[in-house]
Image (spheres, rainbow, N blue to C red):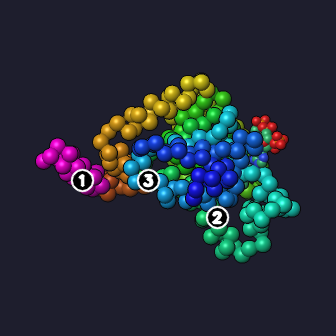
Amino acid sequence: MTTEELLALGLRVDVDGAVATITLDRPEVRNAQTPQMWRALASVGETLPEDVQVVVVQGAGDTFSSGLDRRMLDPRGTGDDQETVVGLLQRSDEVISATIDDYQKGFTFLRDPRFVSIAKVRGHAVGAGFQLALSCDIRIVADDVKFSMKESALGLVPDLTGTKPLVEAVGYSRALEICATARTVGAEESVRIGLALSAHPGDELDDVVKTLVESLTAPMPGVVSETKKLLQGANDRDLDEQRRLEREAQTRRFRAVAAALGG
Ligand code: CAA
């Protein structure tokens, strides 16, 4: 998609060498998300250059994202031809499921082992916004962060791939409580329960993320991605399977290091 097409959907994508920055850019509606935006995010994920090693996801202005654009739930539609979530009601269960599968691809690409994804989160991360942050490998937050999984308050469940990483981050019991009550999780708690890696004063957040990005891009190309592949899903594998993957990864690394040294 062209820069103009992305901008029209409220997305900015800046690629600078090994670092891609994706900005939700609809500050006038607190970076509310639309189905078109999710489809565009999926397309961005498919077309990121091969040498991108880190992807930073952020929101324009003081808030990460207010979640689903509420116009998408208005039975009267949006007044134009825009795809809405409520429009799905007229479809069969199979079509609804296939459509949500497409939406989810706007989130799942952030788990690609090719790069490390970082959510830089200020202010509110509501519903789909919370789930977008959860799709990233690492969340670094400002002191004013407010995570809330608002879906249950609307009679819905979180369906944009956030439930698995939430359980992995905070455990089943806490995840259930956060989703079912739709309550807000602030900065101190988010770090304490493992939802965020660290919290910082708002005016320091950019520098903290920049330093982390520099550290992640410092090692030899390939090694961080190989490490991510190894750690991703480690909980779901038994020890024998995990140590086999370690051996295989290390063999590839030995050869890559030797090749780099001219061996
Ligand atoms: N969709 C559309 N417009 C939104 C919006 C949203 N999700 N969130 C905020 N806006 C608009 C407001 O209508 C307002 O517009 P006007 O200036 O024209 O009045 C503008 O953005 C600013 O909003 P606030 O004054 O409320 O901003 P705030 O900074 O005081 O509060 C907020 C921010 C806490 C995020 C609050 O706006 C809010 O609660 N928004 C709704 C959040 C919500 O319910 N999202 C849906 C969650 S469910 C989901 O995401 C998953 C799913 O797929 C179902």
Amino acid carrying label 2: it is Ile
Mark before the other along the chain sequence, 1 or 3:
3
- Say which quarter of the image contains residue 63: top right
Range drawn in magenta: 243-263
Callout 3 crowding tier (Cα within 10 Å): few <14, some 14–19, many ≥20: some
Residue 8 at x, y percent in the picture = 68, 53
Residue at 49% x, 59% y: name it: 46
Compared with 13, 89 (above or below) is: below
Q: Which mark is residue 252?
A: 1
Q: Which residue is mark 2?
A: 100
Q: Residue at x 59, y 24 (%)?
A: 203
The residue at the point 60 percent across, 64 percent down is: 102
Instruction: Say what secondary structure mark 3 lies in.
Output: loop
Badge 3 or badge 2: first in the primary sequence:
3
Q: From this viewpoint, is residue 106 visible?
A: no
Identify the residue position indicated by label 3 in the image.
Answer: 49
Question: x and y percent of residue 185 in the render?
Answer: 66, 36
**Closer-to-camera residue (38/237):** 38
Magenta stretch contains residue 97: no
Seen in the image, is 229 located left or right of residue 21?
A: left
- The crowding category of the residue bearing disc 1, from other C-alpha atoms within 10 Å (few below 14, some 14 to 19, many at least 20), is some
Residue 107: percent from left, percent from top = 57, 54
Is 236 left or right of 77, judged from the image as shown?
left
- Per the image, label 1 sits on a secondary structure element best described as helix
> For the residues marked 1 and 3, what is the alpha-carbon distance in whole angstroms?
22 Å
Q: Earlier in the sequence, mark 1 or mark 2?
A: 2
In the rendered structure, which amino acid carries the disc numbered 3? Pro
